[in-house]
Image: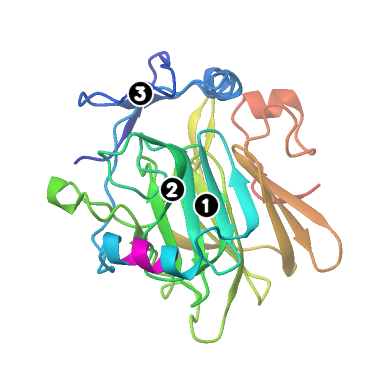
């Protein structure tokens, strides 16, 4: 099944409970309209993406193991952003509820939504979850990152499949070996926005993929202006970073020395360092101290 696409056309919205049709879905380029849709609880038609096939346990077997291990797992954290909601139990099991129109719950595309929590058949136990409006990122106890959902602007950080036969495997593994020493460096935080995903390592380094977006200029790019990062790249900062915070189309970095850096879309003052006119002219300003 082909990847999702965005157009400059106006964004139409439908109610979350409506079952998605088989017609191609699109996401528009108008962020302001999208923000309104999110606040009103609406969702808009998009084309569903597919995850790269991975070898995982049989879903039924995995579900049975979870039920046998904990019939009513105690949640240690809950992520609720826009449409999907995830509960992460103390045992590292992921339960999903909400809209699955872009397979952002990690479930088969035939499942349009879940009103009751359902286990996500990930092959590893999860220690942290981050959600964008249409994609999800999971950090496992083995220092691996799995992503699922919409990949039209490479928010998943990996190739996706166009083959309908791969429908059973909605999630896939992100290869971090090209940018970090996976044996020496440990990922300690993951964050996600509309079309970007960033991770922080225990070495104080930041890696990311996807892109920031603007209602006036469209694709901002992540590191290079106008260029989407299809796979992980290092986002270099002048200081070691200890914490990340992601907005819809911008990110804040807290340094070891207590300084705050920002990057992304600053159209409405999110970066706290660009004036409105510079932002409207499409000035990203790169990474700067706030």
Residue corresponding to mark 3? 45
Classed neighbour count for the residue bearing mark 3: other residues with Cα under 10 Å, few (<14), some (14–19), many (≥20)? some
Q: Look at the image and say whether residue 64 sits in the magenta stretch.
A: yes
* Number of numbered tags placed on the structure image: 3
Residue 108: percent from the left, percent from the top?
28, 46
Evaluate whether residue 41 shows in this view: yes
- The disc at residue 155 is 2
Classed neighbour count for the residue bearing mark 2: other residues with Cα under 10 Å, few (<14), some (14–19), many (≥20)? many
Q: Earlier in the sequence, mark 2 or mark 1?
A: 2
Question: Mark 3 or mark 2, which is nearer to you?
Answer: 3
Q: Identify the main secondary structure in magenta.
A: helix
> The N terminus is located in which quarter?
top left
Asked if residue 107 is positioned above or below residue 188 in the image, the reply reads: above
Towards the viewer: 90 or 44: 90
Asked if residue 261 is positioned above or below residue 1 in the image, the reply reads: below
Is 120 displayed left or right of 202 in the figure?
left
Furthest toward the bottom, the residue is 184
Residue corresponding to mark 1? 197
Residue at 60 percent across and 47 percent down: it is: 79
Residue at 40 percent across and 14 percent down: it is: 12
Instruction: State the CA–CA distance, disc 3 to disc 2.
Output: 18 Å
Evaluate whether residue 209 shows in this view: no
């Amino acid at each position: 099944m082909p990847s999702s696409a965005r157009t400059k056309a106006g964004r139409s919205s439908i109610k979350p409970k409506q079952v998605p049709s088989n017609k191609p879905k699109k996401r528009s380029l108008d962020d302001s309209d999208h923000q309104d849709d999110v606040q009103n609880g609406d969702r808009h038609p998009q084309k569903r993406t597919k995850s790269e096939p991975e070898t995982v346990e049989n879903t039924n077997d995995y579900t049975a193991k979870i039920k046998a291990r904990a019939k009513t797992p105690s949640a240690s954290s809950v992520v609720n952003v826009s449409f999907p909601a995830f509960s992460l139990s103390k045992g590292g099991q992921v339960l999903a509820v909400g809209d699955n129109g872009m397979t952002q719950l990690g479930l088969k595309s035939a499942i349009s939504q879940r009103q009751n929590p359902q286990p996500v058949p990930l092959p590893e136990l999860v220690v942290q979850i981050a959600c964008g409006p249409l994609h999800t990122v999971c950090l496992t106890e083995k220092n691996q990152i799995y992503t699922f959902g919409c990949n039209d602007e490479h928010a998943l950080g990996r190739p996706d499949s166009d083959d309908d036969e791969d429908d059973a495997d909605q999630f896939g593994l992100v290869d971090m070996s090209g940018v970090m020493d996976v044996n020496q460096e440990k990922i300690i935080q993951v964050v996600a926005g509309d079309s970007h995903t960033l991770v922080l390592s225990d070495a104080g380094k930041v890696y990311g993929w996807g892109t920031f977006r603007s209602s006036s200029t469209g694709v901002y790019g992540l590191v290079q202006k106008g260029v989407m990062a299809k796979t992980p790249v290092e986002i270099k900062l002048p200081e070691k970073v200890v914490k990340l915070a992601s907005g819809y189309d911008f990110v804040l970095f807290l340094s070891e020395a207590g300084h705050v850096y920002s990057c992304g879309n600053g159209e409405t003052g999110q970066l706290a360092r660009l004036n409105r006119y510079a932002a409207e002219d499409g000035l990203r300003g790169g990474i700067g101290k706030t």
